């Protein structure tokens, strides 16, 4: 290897594969002890070329994976109660995958620039609005020139503002999504659980957008604020109010198909703006629970598109416009070819990307 070995990347590879230090030592069949492994991860010693080859084989990555000079970010700050039930190993693996995507995006966009179609998401201090996330949601809708009524494709809307949406399997239903603010030459990124039903995915995207807009500095009320933002962003009170009459479960199904949000979020919205009493609100949720609809509702909004495209199109640009082979691209990212295809599926649709002349391929 011509570039120095980055111990942080060894640490990241272990997290991606859910392999502890002791497990990795065992996989290496005595080539190294745990103390030596710890020193390599901390950057105190450099491994031999032969050991780098063994590490890559054991962790199913390319040797180039370990030469990435980038730093690793801290896990996102969260006040979400559901995460307290999440196994530590699962949370570490989810964050590791997001870090891998972040580092990959940095490489992929070396020769490509995003050209937002609409203004970037604003950074707004929610304290200046007395914690009123709903008002901020309507301000963002106005800034982006969104027409009244439902948002047909929130994924494209968010990506048109220059935010990258990355879906992948979290392996747990306890986290719907999380985000990273822009920095280190990267745009903001929203990571979303690919296993979500489309109605929950849309709400999660709006929720994370709320965090990007309002929570440059986290606070203890941020999850509630982001939920209020998402509800108002997807279902503005001024527009949905006239729809909330003669309310029963079949009506909520119809409203779900129109607004692209879950029946439960619409029920909550109706109660929040005074269209349902406390007794009615409780009744509907009891009925939904009895029918087993709390996790999976009887209908989904499959007619809505909601397909992230920016990252896929950037991969496509490397393969078609920059002349990379799949093997070369996988080598650049430090992964095996099969994971390039499964983690970065290709597509034809091209969002606003601009190639940047650099005199050669990005490395």
Image (cartoon, rainbow, N blue to C red):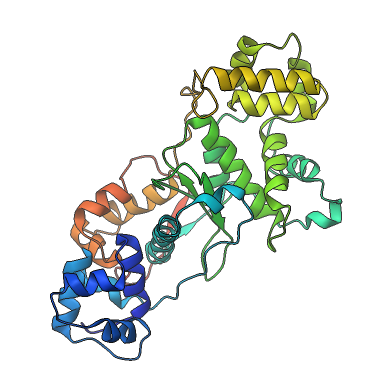
Query: In screen coordinates, is 334 left or right of 147?
Result: left
- Residue 107, placed above or below residue 288: below
**Along the viewing direction, whichever of 97 and 184 lies nearer the viewer:** 97
- Residue 284, placed above or below residue 355: above
- Where residue 137 sits in the image (x, y, percent)? 73, 42
Rendering quarter of residue 102 = bottom left
Rendering quarter of residue 7 = bottom left
Residue at image location 28% in from the left, 70% down from the top? 65
**Along the viewing direction, whichever of 238 and 48 lies nearer the viewer:** 48
- Residue 112, placed above or below residue 263: below
Q: Quadrant of the C terminus?
A: bottom left
Q: In which quarter of the image is the N terminus?
A: bottom left
- Residue 351, placed above or below residue 40: above
- Where residue 218 sits in the image (x, y, percent)? 68, 61
- Where residue 244 sits in the image (x, y, percent)? 75, 16
- Where residue 243 sits in the image (x, y, percent)? 73, 16
Q: Does the image show residue 234?
A: yes
């Amino acid at each position: 290897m011509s570039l120095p070995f980055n111990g942080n990347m060894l640490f990241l590879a272990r997290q991606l594969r859910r392999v502890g230090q002791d497990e990795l030592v065992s996989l290496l069949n005595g080539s190294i002890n745990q103390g030596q492994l710890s020193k390599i991860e901390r950057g105190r010693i450099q491994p031999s070329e032969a050991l780098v080859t063994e590490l890559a084989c054991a962790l199913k990555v390319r040797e180039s994976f370990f030469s990435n000079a980038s730093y690793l970010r801290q896990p996102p700050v969260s006040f979400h109660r559901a995460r307290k039930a999440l196994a530590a190993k699962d949370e570490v693996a989810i964050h590791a995958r997001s870090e891998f995507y972040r580092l990959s995006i940095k490489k992929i966009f070396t020769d490509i620039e995003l050209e937002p179609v609409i203004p970037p998401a604003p950074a707004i201090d929610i304290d200046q609005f007395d914690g009123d996330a709903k008002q901020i949601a309507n301000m963002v809708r106005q800034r982006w020139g969104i027409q009244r009524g439902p948002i047909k494709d929130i994924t494209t809307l968010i990506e048109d503002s220059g935010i990258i949406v990355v879906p992948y399997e979290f392996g747990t239903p306890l986290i719907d999504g999380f985000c990273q603010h822009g920095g280190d030459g990267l745009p903001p990124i929203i990571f979303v659980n690919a296993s979500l039903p489309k109605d929950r995915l849309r709400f999660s995207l709006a929720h994370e957008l709320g965090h990007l807009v309002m929570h440059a500095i986290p606070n203890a009320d941020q999850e509630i604020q982001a939920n209020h933002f998402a509800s108002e962003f997807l279902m503005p009170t001024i527009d949905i109010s006239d729809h909330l009459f003669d309310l029963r479960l079949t009506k909520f199904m119809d409203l779900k198909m129109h607004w692209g949000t879950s029946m439960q979020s619409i029920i909550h919205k109706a109660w929040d703006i005074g269209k349902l009493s406390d007794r009615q609100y409780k009744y509907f949720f009891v009925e939904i629970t009895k029918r087993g609809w709390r996790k999976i509702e009887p209908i989904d909004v499959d007619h809505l598109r909601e397909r992230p495209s920016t990252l896929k199109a950037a991969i496509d640009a490397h393969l078609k416009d920059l002349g990379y082979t799949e093997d070369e691209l996988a080598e650049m990212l430090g992964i095996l070819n099969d994971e390039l295809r499964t983690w970065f599926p290709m597509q034809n649709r091209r969002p606003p990307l601009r190639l940047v002349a650099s005199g050669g391929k990005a490395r």
